[in-house]
Amino acid sequence: MTVLGDATQRGAGVWLPFYRGHPLSLVSRVPQLLLPPRKISGHMKHGAWPVRDPVRLAVTVAASIAAGIPGSLVTKTGPGTWYGTLVKPWFFPPPFVFAPVWTVLYILMGIAAYRVWMEGTDKPAVRGALALFAVQLILNMLWSLIFFGLENPALALADILLLLLVLIATIVRFSAVRRDAAWLLVPYVLWVCFATVLNVSIVLLNPA
């Protein structure tokens, strides 16, 4: 999903710190997620856990990032484009903000899905959580195709509202499987809330 702007885009022995704290501190610790384990007196540091399947981690992160590719192909924001003619709210962020924000969010989404997946797809709670994750990922992808591809902010608004509902449900289901996975989606849902406000503003400021 490219929110009103351009979208860009180790094996065994890798350890992820288990998280129980504030969501903002979790985001600040994202670089640690792929660092080698630190050991104390020959033992793994308390609170860490291994990446048991780096392939699955790569798959979930890649799938999340791939959701933004179709939208980036139809996103045109330069001078003389339809998007350039839209009246935007005063609090609209500069275009360079969107690419790095979405890159981080897609990575967090992939890590969250990986953590839930590793709890075992034989469990109904895991299958249900991942199914909702897939639905929200599709809705995420559709937003850019509708807004930029179809040049239809009103229909895009309907999509993002549905996305927000499914995303909240996904966080609830993730929390039932792994709380840390649910926390990883908090920055994402906050950004989607902001994107919804932007979408509403675009619709109101640009009546058909």
Image: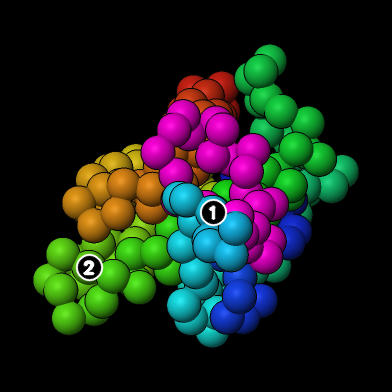
Farthest left residue? Answer: 124
Quarter holding residue 97: top right
**One can see residue 170 in this view:** no
Q: What percent of the width, then of the height, locates residue 207?
A: 51, 28
Q: Is residue 25 magenta?
A: yes
Looking at the image, which is closer to me, 195 or 191? 191
Question: In the shown orientation, is residue 79 left or right of residue 178?
Answer: right
Looking at the image, which is closer to me, 163 or 202? 163
Q: Earlier in the sequence, mark 2 or mark 1?
A: 1
Residue for point 81% across, 40% down: 96
Question: In the shown orientation, is residue 206 left or right of residue 121?
Answer: right
Q: Which mark is residue 45?
A: 1
Residue interval drawn in magenta: 16-40
Where 22 falls versus 107 (above or below)?
above
Residue for point 38% across, 52% down: 181
Q: CA distance from mark 2 to mark 1?
A: 28 Å
Farthest top residue? Answer: 90
Q: What percent of the width, then of the height, locates residue 32?
A: 65, 52
Quarter holding residue 107: bottom right
Kind of residue sitting beneath label 2: Val
Q: Which mark is residue 126?
A: 2
Q: Secondary structure at mark 2?
A: helix
Q: Is residue 153 magenta?
A: no
- Binning the other alpha carbons within 10 Å of mark 1 as few (below 14), some (14 to 19) or many (20 upward) gives some
- Binning the other alpha carbons within 10 Å of mark 2 as few (below 14), some (14 to 19) or many (20 upward) gives many
Q: Secondary structure at mark 1?
A: loop
Residue for point 45% across, 50% down: 47
Where 186 falls versus 175 (above or below)?
above
Q: What percent of the width, then of the height, locates residue 28?
A: 64, 38
Residue for point 68% across, 25% down: 92
Quarter holding residue 95: top right
